[in-house]
Amino acid sequence: MFSRRSFIQGAGAAAGAAVLAGSKPAEAFTFAEFFQKHYKELTPKDKEAIFKRIEHETKAAYGVDVTITDPPPIPEVEFAYFLSLTRCNGNRKCVEACVKENNQSRDPAIQYITVLEMEAGSFDLVEGDRYYNPPEVPRKDKFYLPVQCQHCRNPPCVRACPVEATWKEADGIVVVDYNWCIGCRYCMAACPYEARHFNFTKPSIPADQINPNQSYLSNRIRMKGVVEKCTFCLHRTRNGKYPACLEACPTGARKFGNLRDPNSEVSQILKHKRVYVLKEELNTRPQFYYFFD
Amino acid sequence: MRNYLNYWLSMFRFAIKGGKLYYLWVGFLVALIGWGGLLYYHQLVEGLIVTHMSDQVSWGLGIANFVYFVGVAASAVILVFPAYINRNQDIKEVVLLAQQLAFTAIVMCLLFIITDIGRPERFLHMIPFMGGHLNLPSSILAWDVVVINIYFVLNLYVPAYLLYMRYMGRQTKWYLYYPLIFVLMFFAIGIQVSEAFLLSGLGSRYFWNTAILAPRFIISAFSVGPAIFYLVFLAVNYHTKLAVKSTVFDYLKSVMRVTLPINLFLLLCEIFKELYPGTLHAASAQYLYFGLKGHHLLIWFIWPATIMNVIAALLVSFKQFRNNQVLFLIACHLCILGLWIEKGMGLVIPGFIPTPLGEISEYYPNLDEVVLCLGIAAIGALMFTVIAKVTTGVLTGELRYEKKSSLKERD
Ligand code: SF4
Ligand code: SF4
């Protein structure tokens, strides 16, 4: 039942680990992965061992030292993202920053953010174009609609997953346990925003472009055959930083913050601007809003 | 226990005996299985990238076949009901074959799923009590796993028990199987319904999100099933000593007479509801039947399929056609093929086109996918060939306890 890749990777990782930390049999890694429990059942000690293992594996495979952390949700925080459709000009700097920050596969390319070039005067998505490539943006009579995981409060993807490999955390972030996902892709069929992406093969990332600051439930390097998606950069945002896409946006179209705090920028936008959510009729109740200003 | 082992041994001996044609057929299937297995190994190594599936169309030929064969598995109930509940003796003589066909179809379904998921080695995650987390009650896919596995076990146990008793020449004890027949019929409908809910429960896929999907699945299963049984029983009559009574064939005909036209009617209802209001929600149906924004790959699948289904329905509806054996056989083939296309390329695939964000990304299976599916079909065919051979042996008394030495085989 084991694929050759995981066997080879296991063996490679074992060799690497042997150099680093004394000898360990090759199968240990594969078996450790095979018998690894669901994220929610892991004790702190289990986690420590698993994170170590992943760090070793990454070192062996890419020669890069990475740190795996597991920042928990902050109490009394409900994250929300606001995107100004007035300001967004479709430059796609966010897409680029996201790919780098989150160690997405470059080939085949996986991108969490889809920016649609829309015909002015219509919200019909079929009329949108995600492969637009003009010499200069924004183009006349177009507007730009970036879509990523909306971190639904009523997430169809979580309901769909047969094995509870994906769930909503206390701060609203919808995460995937990459070691638990069986790769059935039912969640992809369920998601109304095309937010979920499947690793059809082993992701490929140039070693010198790996972001070493990784977390277990977000940007650690994924394996073949599992689903991944935007996590609001939880390894950043739970540590008080902004998501990478927000920092990369040159127009200031992106706002992020805590909805539970009435004085936060996002609470103010919700209160005072004209706010809109995508596909409201599906009652997914996104934590990702669009606004006009 | 020893009897039971001997039973297996004699079945095995019986199964490997056959004429040239038999070996040729088995050899052909084994070759197909080998080819499919090789490509599956390739897929395990490289990942699902070797298929034509994508983020946009994330399910393909494998799931399409899965949906179809769940229908085949469920349709055994068409014969189970009259055999056990109405106690129709002629049908009861052959119902075991139908149940074994259902069992084979379920095995194929499980194989279609296992070969389609990204991490098949994580199957334990689906098994409660073994560290797994089955997402019940919310995930329809989790329900599907449960229902299909129960149906699998029931269809394994009941025919096996009856067959063994027949082989031993013993009386069956009603309480050891009869109550299970009711459960089995319930689950036959159950696997169809959960299959349909799997798709219709997705609010953002307008093409699937329709109330008549479950009825449509059941009716189309009850159209394909009898057609397949008809052909299988003909083959049994021709190749084995078991004589399937003509009343059984008449019964299957009469079922198809009802279900084929209803199937067309339900399709009509669906098409009307999709296309007449002219809303944007009909984009998938529009794409399927007429093409959308210059893309019309599926037209080449759906129109031939629709024409086949219409012709099949006409052929079974009129007495003159129906009673002509050649025409009726044509109807069976058209129905089996037409509904296969309609349920697969015509139902699963257009659900993904356009995508929720409006992209039109077309899909057609590549050679790897086709061969893998053929390999699974070959496993099914081989299983059923062997099972049917042994079963007819037992049913005709060729294969029975104590009389092992008098085995004779006819081609
Ligand atoms: S946008 Fe899609 S992936 Fe994200 S929470 Fe909603 S349904 Fe799930
Ligand atoms: S692909 Fe993974 S996360 Fe998605 S439904 Fe299947 S097991 Fe769950």
Image (spheres, coloured by chain):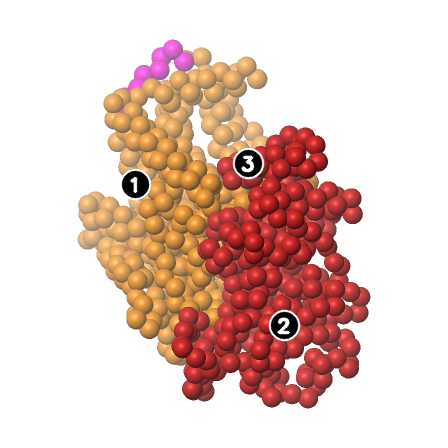
Chain colours: A red, B orange
Q: What is the count of numbered marks?
A: 3
Location of residue B219 in the rendering, given as x and y in whole percent from the top left corner: 40, 56
Q: Residue furthest front?
A: A208
Label ID, residue A247: 2
Magenta segment includes B405: yes
Instruction: Give the label on residue B231, or none.
Output: 1
* Residue at position x 29%, y 35% in the image: B235
Q: Which chain is home to disc 3? A: A
State whether discs 2 and 3 lie on one chain.
yes
Instruction: Tell me whether circle 2 and circle 3 mark residues in contact (CB < 8 Å).
Output: no
Residue B154 in view:
no
Q: Amino acid at mark 2?
A: Glu
Which range of residues does the magenta coloring cover? B404-411
Q: Label 1 marks which chain's residue?
A: B
Look at mark 3 in the image and give the residue it sits on.
A7
Q: Is residue A115 above or below residue A159?
A: below
In the image shown, does B278 or A267 lie closer to the viewer? A267
Is residue B202 or residue A108 the one in the foreground?
A: A108
Q: Residue at x 49, y 30 (%)?
A: B160
Q: Report the mark closest to the observer, 1 or 3.
A: 3
Residue contact between numbered discs 1 and 2, judged by CB atoms under 8 Å: no
